[in-house]
Image (tube, grey):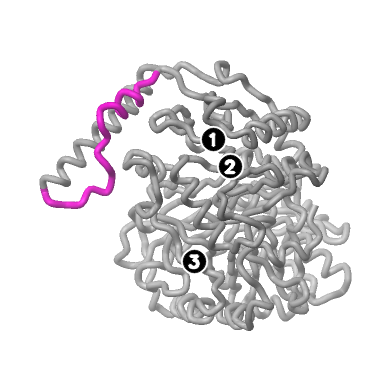
C-alpha cells in the first residue's frame, strides 16, 4: 500500500526507523556493566553468559565497558551541575514561601557524582547484573536517558509464577523499575525468564524450549532498539488558540469520551495508574531522574481513549492524471511528494496506483496520567492534529500546559490510526466501496481504544480485520509502533477490498503490549467490551490464541 519512507513522511518521523528484528539487532550497541560476582546469583550469571553469546550470534555490537565510556566536556559537566544548583535554589525558595517543592534537594555527594569526567556514550545500552550500589547505578553513569536503555538481569521474584495475574506482574515490574532505575527487567531462574518493560506486559519464556535465540531476537532486541519515548511539547506546533469542550464543534465528541468511561469501567481493562511519588525509588534524587525520564510527568496510566473528529475527504487521482497535474513534483520510484506545503501520497491498491493529498486530521484524546474512566472534561481532554507530517496541539479553554497536562505516550499511534482512517475513507469514496465505513466516518468521525489485553479471536466482529500479530515486540510510544499501525491498517483495507468484503474497522495487535481497536464511537466500543471477560481481559491470555512468530 505505502512504503516505509512514505509512512515516515506522513507521520513526521525524521529519524531512521528499523522495522525488522534482524536489522534492529544489527544496529544494537550493548555494553555489560561491571559487577561483583559474589553478589550475583548463579542463575543470573548463567543467563547473562547465554544472552551475550546469543547477541553476538545475532550481529549485535558488544562494546567492552572501558571502550563504552567517553570523556564528558567540562562545559557539559558544568551545565549538569548548574542545573542541580538551580534546582536547589528553587527548592529553597519554595520552602521559604511555604510551598511543597515539586523536586527534591540534591545533596553534595550527588553533586560531586554529577561532575564525573567519564560516562557511557549515548546510543550504547547497558546490561547490568543483579543489584548495583546506590550512587553507582548504570543510570548514574549514562550520557543520555533517551538514547541508552538500561537492562537489568535479576533473580525472578519468588511470588511470581505462570499463574500470576496481570496486576501481580504489573505491580512487581513497576517496583523493580523504580528501585533499580532500569528500563527493562529480565527476571530469571533455572527454568524460565520474563521480560518486563513499560508496556505492562510479561512474556514468559522457557529456557529449555530450543527457541532462546528466537525469543531474544523478537522479544528483547526490539524493546531495546525501540524504547519508550514520551512526546514533548517541543515536538508539537502548540497553538495559542484554545478550544471549548462545550461548543457545537466539540461537545458531542467530548460527551462520547466521558460517557464511554462508565461502560469501560465495568470491564476492568483500564486499571488505576501509578504515581511517581508512590514508587519505591531509593532516594528523592532517583525519583527526580525518573520524573525527568518521563518528561516531568507525575505518573503513568495505561491505555487510552480517543475520538477522531470528522475531516474533509481528499480528492483522489489516478496515477496517470496525477502525473499530468503534478509533473514536476512526482519523482519516479517515490510514493510521496510535496505540492507547495501539502503532502501527497501514492497508494497502491491491488496493483493500481492512486494519488491523494494526505488528509488533515484532528483527534480529541485524554491527557497522560488521567483517570481514563472518570475523566474531567474541563481538564483532561487534549486536542491533537496531524497536518502534512506536523503534529499540532490545542488545550481546552482555561487550561495551562504544565507538567500535569501531557500528551499520551501513544500519541503517534493515535495519529497514525486517525490518518489511516481518513486515507481509507477518501479512497473508498473515490472507488465507491465500503460505503458504511465512509458514511460513518464523514458523519461521526472515528473512535479508537487501547488497552493492555487482546480480543478473544472467537469474538472478532464481522467486518473487522486483524493485523500486527507478527510484528516485533517494540515499546509503546516508539516510532515503529506508529508505522506498524498505519501500514497494517492500509494492508487489511487492501485485503478486504481484494476479497470483496465489507471493511468496517480494524484490530491492531501490538504483541506483548496490547490492542488498538477502531470503532464508530467510544460508546459503541464500551458496549462491545462490556459484554464480559469472554470478549477481552487484561494480560496475555487471548494473545496466546493468535498465531505468533
Residue at 69 percent across and 40 percent down: it is 18
Which percent across, then down, holds residue 146?
Answer: 50, 38
Report if residue 415 lies within the magenta region: no
Q: Which residue is mark 3?
A: 365
Q: Which residue is mark 2?
A: 155
Measured Cα–Cα span from mark 2 to mark 3: 39 Å
Measured Cα–Cα span from mark 3 to mark 1: 40 Å
Q: Tell me which segment is drawn in magenta.
A: 97-116
Which percent across, then down, holds residue 247?
Answer: 40, 78
Who comes first in sequence, dot 2 or dot 3? 2
Q: Which residue is mark 1?
A: 130
Which percent across, then down, holds residue 381?
Answer: 42, 67
Mark 3 neighbour class, 10 Å CA radius: few under 14, some 14 to 19, many 20 or more: many
Circles 2 and 1, Cβ within 8 Å, touching? The answer is yes
Who comes first in sequence, dot 3 or dot 1? 1
Note whether residue 477 is visible. yes
Mark 1: which secondary structure? loop
Amino acid at each position: 500500500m505505502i512504503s516505509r519512507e512514505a509512512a515516515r513522511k506522513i507521520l513526521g518521523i525524521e529519524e531512521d526507523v528499523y522495522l525488522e528484528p534482524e536489522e534492529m539487532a544489527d544496529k544494537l550497541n550493548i555494553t555489560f556493566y561491571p559487577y561483583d560476582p559474589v553478589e550475583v546469583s548463579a542463575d543470573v550469571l548463567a543467563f547473562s553468559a547465554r544472552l551475550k553469546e546469543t547477541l553476538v550470534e545475532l550481529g549485535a555490537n558488544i562494546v567492552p565497558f572501558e571502550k563504552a565510556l567517553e570523556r564528558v566536556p567540562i562545559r557539559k559537566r558544568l551545565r549538569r551541575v548548574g542545573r542541580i544548583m538551580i534546582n536547589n535554589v528553587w527548592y529553597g525558595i519554595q520552602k521559604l514561601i511555604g510551598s511543597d517543592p515539586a523536586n527534591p534537594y540534591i545533596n553534595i555527594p550527588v553533586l560531586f557524582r554529577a561532575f564525573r569526567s567519564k560516562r557511557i556514550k549515548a546510543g550504547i545500552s547497558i546490561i547490568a547484573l543483579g543489584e548495583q550500589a546506590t550512587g553507582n547505578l548504570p543510570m548514574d553513569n549514562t550520557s543520555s536517558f533517551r538514547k541508552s536503555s538500561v537492562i537489568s538481569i535479576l533473580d525472578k521474584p519468588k511470588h511470581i509464577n505462570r499463574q500470576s495475574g496481570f496486576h501481580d506482574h504489573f505491580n512487581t515490574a513497576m517496583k523493580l523499575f523504580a528501585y533499580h532505575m532500569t528500563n527493562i527487567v529480565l527476571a530469571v531462574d533455572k527454568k524460565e525468564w520474563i521480560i518486563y518493560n513499560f508496556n505492562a506486559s510479561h512474556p514468559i519464556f522457557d529456557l529449555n524450549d530450543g527457541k532462546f535465540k528466537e525469543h531474544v531476537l523478537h522479544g528483547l532486541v526490539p524493546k531495546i532498539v525501540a524504547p519508550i519515548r514520551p512526546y514533548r511539547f517541543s515536538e508539537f506546533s502548540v497553538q495559542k488558540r484554545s478550544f471549548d469542550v462545550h461548543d457545537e464543534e466539540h461537545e458531542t465528541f467530548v460527551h462520547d469520551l466521558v460517557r464511554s468511561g462508565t461502560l469501560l469501567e465495568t470491564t476492568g481493562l483500564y486499571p488505576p495508574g501509578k504515581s511517581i511519588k508512590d514508587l519505591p525509588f531509593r532516594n528523592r534524587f532517583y525519583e527526580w531522574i525518573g520524573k525527568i525520564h518521563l518528561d516531568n510527568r507525575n505518573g503513568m496510566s495505561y491505555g487510552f481513549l480517543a475520538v477522531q473528529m470528522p475531516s474533509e475527504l481528499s480528492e483522489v487521482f489516478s496515477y496517470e492524471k496525477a502525473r499530468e497535474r503534478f509533473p514536476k513534483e512526482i519523482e519516479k520510484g517515490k510514493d510521496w511528494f510535496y505540492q507547495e506545503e501539502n503532502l501527497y501520497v501514492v497508494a497502491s491498491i491491488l496493483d493500481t496506483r492512486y494519488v491523494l493529498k494526505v488528509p488533515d486530521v484532528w483527534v480529541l484524546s485524554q491527557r497522560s496520567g488521567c483517570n481514563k474512566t472518570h475523566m474531567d472534561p474541563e481538564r483532561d481532554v487534549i486536542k491533537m492534529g496531524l497536518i502534512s507530517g506536523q503534529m499540532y496541539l490545542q488545550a481546552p479553554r482555561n487550561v495551562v500546559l504544565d507538567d500535569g497536562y501531557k500528551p499520551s505516550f501513544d500519541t503517534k499511534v493515535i495519529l497514525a490510526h486517525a490518518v489511516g482512517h481518513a486515507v481509507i475513507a477518501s479512497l473508498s469514496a473515490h472507488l465507491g466501496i465500503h460505503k458504511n465505513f465512509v458514511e460513518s466516518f464523514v458523519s461521526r468521525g472515528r473512535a479508537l481504544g487501547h488497552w493492555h489485553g487482546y480480543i478473544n479471536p472467537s469474538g472478532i466482529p464481522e467486518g473487522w480485520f486483524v493485523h500486527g500479530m507478527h510484528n516485533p515486540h517494540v515499546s509503546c510510544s516508539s516510532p515503529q509502533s506508529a508505522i506498524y499501525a498505519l501500514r497494517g491498517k492500509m494492508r487489511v483495507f487492501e485485503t478486504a477490498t481484494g476479497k470483496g468484503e465489507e471493511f468496517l474497522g480494524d484490530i491492531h495487535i501490538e504483541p506483548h503490549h496490547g490492542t488498538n481497536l477502531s470503532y464508530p464511537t467510544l460508546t459503541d466500543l464500551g458496549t462491545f467490551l462490556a459484554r464480559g471477560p469472554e470478549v477481552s481481559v487484561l494480560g496475555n491470555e487471548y494473545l496466546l490464541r493468535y498465531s505468533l512468530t
